[in-house]
Image (cartoon, rainbow, N blue to C red):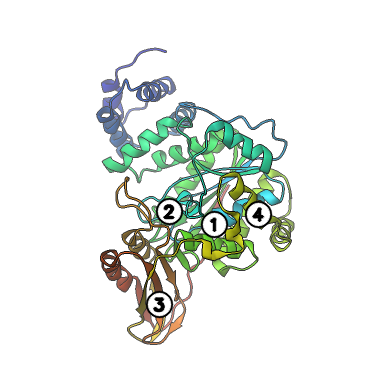
Amino acid sequence: MKHHSIIDLIERKRDGGILQPDELQWIITQYTADSIPDYQMSSLLMAIFIRGFTGEELAAWTEAMLHSGDVLDLSHIPAGKVDKHSTGGVGDKISIPLAPMVAACGVAVPMMSGRGLGHTGGTLDKLESIPGFRTRLDKKEFVEIVERLGLVLGGQSETMAPADRRIYALRDSTGTVPSIPLIASSIMSKKLSEGINGLVLDLKTGSGAFMTNEADARVLAETMVGIGQSHGTKVVATLTGMDQPLGVEVGNANEIAESLDVLSGGGPADVVEITYSLAADMLLLAGVDTDRDVAITRLSDAVNSGAAMEKFQEVIVAQDGNPDVAEDRSLLPVAPGRYELLAREDGVVTKCDARDIGVAGVRLGAGRERKEDLVDPGVAISVLAKIGDSVSKGQPLAAVAYGDENRLQAAIPLLERAWEFGEGADPPPLVIGRVE
């Protein structure tokens, strides 16, 4: 591989120039090999943050990150292989009921998830609230579980897209997270390394999302669909609202309980709607069905017959968790303290701010304020009144389960400002648009 000067490349990108595919490949290779130090990569990331990437640059950068480590070969599995990714929200537990529902319909789902980031929850943290559940799987075990069950719920291994893992940590500490090309390449390099045929994206927009602006979310969707096309992978993106939390439960173990409700045929209407919509996209991408209504009926049958719940229990067993949580929710941890936030006036809820509620959850211990923080799986916020609901003074708006009084006191001001009231309001739309 031809040698380049990292300083020359930083300066060219800083000044608005274009980096060639071989130069981008060299950067990722040298950084992964520790030949480019963090401070120079940080400088380049800031230049990319400010100047952006052309389509060709983005494709080459993503390709280099994708091949910086192991790429799964699942071609020997005859079923269609489709994954789903959400850009993160508050109360967003959709992956947990969705994955077993889709797998129960004959699609292979090699789901690689992440931990909580900022005020948004993480699928891995939620799954690990199931007693014994293990999300750290090596490449061999990850593939073996997909082969056997058609579903695995793991984290990014040390050897898959290692450049992304290191660059992500740098972005988090250098103010370069909210960059569309860097977000798109980070997500797509991980997902394409799974060896999938198709990918369904749930792009959140609103106060509780990283992309608070709908136009930015649409550009990100178009960018990721384009990366998929350049790699021969069909990508369908749905823009969904995140101005208020999804469902009732915000936390970890309590979100597992709500996911089990959906797999049992119940659950909050908004969670059910998004789950079925994205799951139907996965069946269509996998070629299991060609008609959306038929796909939704198939998914409903998988839930009503118990096949979806059984698939989830099989995966829990394969990853060393206790499958009895499906029947006995008391096996899930619950923090001992109880607090209720009461409405201070009569009226209709006009605001139920997802971001404030998400940050309150982090302050309680449901997420991390620093990378090394431990998550308390039993702390919980139950959102009891949402936009458009009529409430009376003294009625509970939220029920909190907490473990530490100081943490509760830090969370209460955020909860108190999360709700606003007026004379009327319609619930915000759940599905805003599609890009494919």
Q: In what element is the residue under mark 3?
A: strand
Tag 1 near tag 4, CB within 8 Å: no
At 54% from the left edge and 29% from the top edge, which residue is drawn? 71
**Which residue is drawn at the image coordinates 45% and 83% (left, top)?**
390
Up the image or down, 35 lies above or below 161; here it is above
Find the distance from the CA under tag 1 to the CA under tag 4: 11 Å
Q: Given contact means CB atoms under 8 Å apart, are the residues at marks 2 and 3 in contact?
A: no
- The part of the image, by quadrant, that contains residue 357 is bottom left
Type of the residue with mark 2 = Ala
Horizontal and vertical percent position of residue 175:
28, 43
| Disc 3: which residue | 397
Instruction: Return the disc, 2 or 3, that comes first in the chain's sequence.
Output: 2
Upstream in the sequence, badge 4 or badge 3? 4
* Residue carrying label 4: 101
Q: For marks 4 and 2, give the one nearer the viewer.
A: 4
Task: State which mark lies toward you, 2 or 1.
Answer: 1
Query: Mark 2: few, some, or many residues within 10 Å (few <14, many ≥20)?
Result: few
Which residue matches tag 1?
94
Give the mark nearer the N terminus: 4 vs 2.
Answer: 4
Please determine whether, in this image, residue 85 is positioned above or below residue 249. Answer: above
Q: Identify which amino acid the numbered label 3 is placed on.
A: Leu
The Cα atoms of the two marked residues, 2 and 3, are separated by 32 Å
| Residue that badge 2 annotates | 215
